[in-house]
Amino acid sequence: MQTSDRFVALFIDADNAPASHVDVILGELANFGTVSIRRAYGNWKGERLNSWERLLHEYAIQPIQQFDLTKGKNATDMALAIDAMDALYSRRVDVFALVSSDSDFTPLATRLQADGKTVVGFGERKTPAAFVNACSKFLFLEREQTPPEASDAEATISVRRWNAKELKCDAKLVTLLRSAVQSAEADDGWSPLGRVGSLIGNQASFDSRNYGYKKLVDLFRAIDLFETENREGRGICVRDKRRGKANGG
């Protein structure tokens, strides 16, 4: 199915998501299809959502009012989940986008994926791992200062770039990369980058941009645990440096 034939439903937990990145969110979702449903949930009677309120008309986002019925309890989560399930059964939706840093949406993301839907999550770095991993893809919304000369159309997700030491200290990341490279390994010890990327995508809601690298190959080069080489007829391939040393080069 072509991207132009796919439909995306965007559900925003305005109470737990920054309004300053809505342009980036919609720009990213354009890669998945047409965003036909755009809803933001919260208590619009208060001042807390003023930053979101200013953007609703500009981006054609429908505000869904939810009063704080009980102190300390949030009705927004329940309303959003109900509407998402309604869309699952009554509307043609191929991709669900959930914008929140709240782990309460983990069961929703899991259920949508179980029905064969792509789930794209957006949230701050503080988002619990359970929700991040429940999504098909998750993008952190912290980004570096956009250059003054950059237009809205040029705005992209761009977080601080992690250095080699920081990358190597992320045991989960190292294990993920090494496991994918090993699984995709050919007889000569080299793994096609495209196959490696597919395996990583099947294991976790991974995106190299969350580490400050636009391309997966740039992340592999930065972490300095792998060799990269353009192999004839196979494109860019990756090899664990430990494998190279074991083979004598």
Image (cartoon, grey):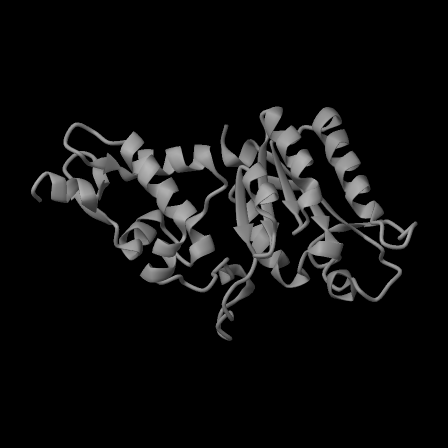
Residue 243 sits above or below residue 23 on the image: above
Residue at left offset 61%, top offset 60%: 21
Residue 128, percent from left and from top: 61, 48
Viewer-closest of 189 and 64? 189
Residue at left offset 47%, top offset 54%: 210
Residue at left offset 54%, top offset 45%: 138
Q: Is residue 144 left or right of residue 18?
A: left
Viewer-closest of 38 and 171? 171
Residue at left offset 63%, top offset 42%: 97
Q: Is residue 193 left or right of residue 25?
A: left
The residue at the far right in this view is 69
The residue at the far bottom in this view is 148
The C terminus, quarter of image? top left
Is residue 37 shown to the viewer in this render? no
Residue 36, percent from left and from top: 67, 40
Residue 69, percent from left and from top: 92, 50
Residue 160 sits above or below residue 39 on the image: below
Is residue 127 shown to the viewer in this render? yes
Q: Is residue 146 left or right of residue 74?
A: left
Residue 131, percent from left and from top: 61, 43
Viewer-closest of 144 and 61? 144
Residue 79 sits above or below residue 58 on the image: above
Count of numbered badges drawn on the protein:
0
- Residue 19 image-quadrant placement: bottom right
